[in-house]
Each structure stands twice: as structure tokens, then as C-alpha cells.
Image (cartoon, rainbow, N blue to C red):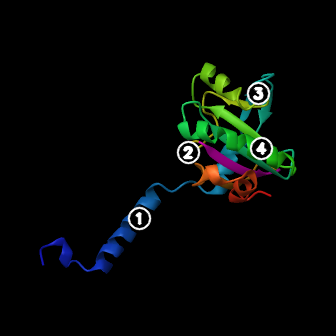
Amino acid sequence: MGSLRAVHPLVWAGGALSLGLVLGGIFARPDAKSEAAAFSSEALGTLSSGKTVSLAGCPTAKCLTVVVAPWCGYCRAATPHVLALRDYLDSRGVTTRIVVGMDKTASVKAYALEFGPDTLLDPEGQVSANGVPHFFVTDAAGAVLKEVAGVPAGLDGLGPKDFASFLGLP
């Protein structure tokens, strides 16, 4: 009875569940309401003009804000998919804002060129994102409706419509 094999499988399952609940409590993310408050206060400059754009609101009913970093391999691999998604959502009246940050200004600007002149620059990492790439769907008032860290599995097989659906967008 001293071996691990003698322990009933339900005991193992119960232990794993308990550990999951403990770790879930330790690593739990803030609720959407508190995240929305922190997210909505950001104001960032654009690549082309340096004018300040606030993330506090959205010019359309819903916005998608994508946060990426130059050093992130997943971000680099997802770049063509994010660009296709932006075009798809634009044709459906959904604003897409791309934020490049969390690196030296020169690296941020160089990567931002891949997304175009309206890309927002955040070298200081003001936008609170737990990992990159990070996708925030917000309403017109800037409240976070959905938040997704990372890209969906099988991204290369998804078209922009499927990617939008994954994010809960039209």
C-alpha cells in the first residue's frame, strides 16, 4: 500500500482539482470591470504623426485592440493574420487599433511600420496586457467585452472571418 499505484484514481483527481483551484485563485486575472478601467485610461502616440489617441472610447460600436511586441515570435507569425483581420473588420464597421510596444523605441517603430501609419506606439508598456499577442474587444465606451491572450490554435488554417468569430466579432 506504500506505492503510488495503490492510491485510488479518484484521490488523484481530487488532489489535482484542489491544486487547480488553489493555483487558479493565485493566478486569477482581475475582473473585466477593473481591467476596463485600467485599459481605458491609456493614451498613445501614432507612428505617422505622433498625435495622441485615447483608448478610453471607440469610434464604432465595437473595437478590437491588438497588442504586440517586436521581440515576440508569435506576434511576428500572426502579423499577416492581424492585417487580414483588420481589413475584414474594417469592411464590417469595426475599428481595429494595433499597439506595438514593450521594447526600445527604435524596435517598436520598426515593427510598427509593418502595420501602417495609424499604429499606436507603446515602448513603455503602458497598455496592461498579460502576454502578447493580446486581443481586447471593447465597446464604444472603452469597456472590455472580451480579452484573449495568444492566438487560436491552427491560426494558419483560419481565415479572417473565423478569426473574427473566435474573438466574438461580426
Q: Find the distance from the CA under tag 1 to the CA under tag 4.
A: 36 Å
Under tag 3, what secondary structure?
A: strand
Quadrant for the C terminus in the image: bottom right
Quadrant for the N terminus in the image: bottom left
- Residue tagged 1: 20
Callout 2 amino acid: Asn
Under tag 2, what secondary structure?
A: loop
Q: Position of residue 117 (x, y in %)?
A: 79, 27
Under tag 4, what secondary structure?
A: helix
Q: Position of residue 100 (x, y in %)?
A: 66, 32
The image shows residue 131, relative to residue 101, as above or below, that is: below
Q: Nearer the N terminus, badge 1 or badge 2?
A: 1
Do tag 2 and tag 3 residues touch (Cβ < 8 Å)?
no
- 101 relative position to 47: left or right: left
Q: Residue at x 79, y 33 (%)?
A: 53
Q: Which mark is in front, 1 or 4?
A: 4
User: Which residue is nearer to you in this view: 64 or 79?
Assistant: 79
- 139 relative position to 167: left or right: right
Callout 1 amino acid: Gly
- Residue tagged 2: 130
**The residue positioned farthest toward the front in the image shown:** 157
Quarter of the image holding residue 128? top right
Stretch of the chain drawn in magenta? 133-140
- Residue tagged 3: 46
- 159 relative position to 15: left or right: right
Q: Tell me the number on the disc at residue 110.
A: none
Callout 3 amino acid: Thr
Q: Position of residue 32 (x, y in %)?
A: 65, 56
Overall secondary structure of the magenta section: strand
Q: Residue at x 29, y 78 (%)?
A: 9
